[in-house]
Image: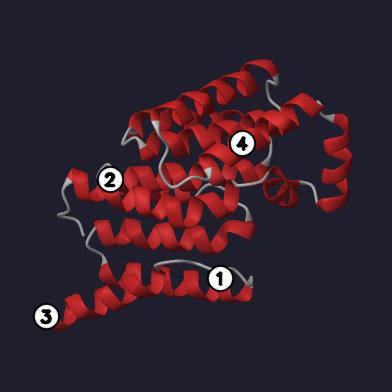
Amino acid sequence: MADRSEEEQLEVVKRWWKENGTSLIAGAALAAAGVFGWHTWQDYQEGQSEAASVRYQQLVNIAMASELDEQQTASARELISELTDDYGKTLYAELALLMDARLAVQQDNLDEAKASLEQVANDSSRRYVQSLAWLRLARIEVANGNPEAALSLLDEPISEALAAQQADVRGDAYAALGQAEQARSAWQNALELAENQNQTLYGVQFKLDDLGAEEATQ
């Protein structure tokens, strides 16, 4: 894994984001549930601009597509700019930045994705949303050949609701460092955490299987 080319690493990020990213940021209610609790989130919604809610839902509808054409991408970017410019530090604006990073990954622009994620990680006061940014930044650092930086990001106080995803990316970082046993332990922990939290975690068992196959050929 440590010898993968830049192009291969980019494909890993894109696949990981597609499998794990959309389910975590597709709706504002999901992110807010980890921050406020459902009833508080309902009260929060009532106090927010209806226009912002509509804009964000439009963004989600566009971004859910597997591949975006030029017009869809332009529309998504316009909505992101409107949400971040007009609604400041609201939850809608922060989730829009997470979507912006997702779009940047789809367009093979990891630097742009990193910039959006760093903005959320540095500025958000909402632990769940901030944790999503840290996780995605760590994944990008692995892809950029900086697994040590990824491990540092994973030491941030990431929300317990995302512990399985945290362990998964930690395993990827260890694998990139050539530390097979640490990677195995982290991925096994990820599966256990996902099971305990009734979450679906894609791809981890395949990575464990591949790790065993690689050892068998050595």
Q: Are marks 2 and 4 in contact (CB under 8 Å)?
A: no
Rendered location of residue 38, percent (x, y) = 82, 52
Please say if 183 is above or below 68. below
Q: Residue at x 34, y 35 (%)?
A: 107
User: Splitting the image into 4 quarters, where does residue 48 fall?
Assistant: top right
Between 108 and 164, the one lying in front of the other is: 108
- The amino acid pointed to by label 2 is Leu
Q: Nearer the viewer, mark 2 or mark 3?
A: 2
Q: Residues within 10 Å of mark 4 (few under 14, many from 20)?
A: many
Q: Front-most of 164 and 66?
A: 66
Distance of mark 1 from mark 4, alpha carbons? 23 Å
Q: Is residue 152 above or below residue 47?
A: below
C-alpha gap between disc 3 and disc 4:
44 Å
Q: Residues within 10 Å of mark 3 (few under 14, many from 20)?
A: few
Where's residue 13, x and y in %?
35, 49
Check disc 4 and report its element: helix, strand or loop: helix
Tag 4 residue? 95
In this orientation, does residue 158 appear?
no
Residue 122 appears in which quarter of the rendering? top right
Going from the N terminus, do you reach mark 2 or mark 1 first?
2
Q: Nearer the viewer, residue 150 or 83?
A: 83
| Residue annotated with mark 2 | 10
- Kind of residue sitting beneath label 4: Leu
First in sequence: mark 3 or mark 4? 4
Question: Mark 3 to mark 1: distance in Å?
Answer: 30 Å
For residue 208, what is the image quadrant?
Answer: bottom left
Q: Mark 1 is on which residue type?
A: Ala
**Residue at mark 2 to residue at mark 3: CA–CA distance:** 26 Å
Left or right: 27 with respect to 73? right
Residue on which the image places disc 1: 194
Residue identified by numbered label 3: 217
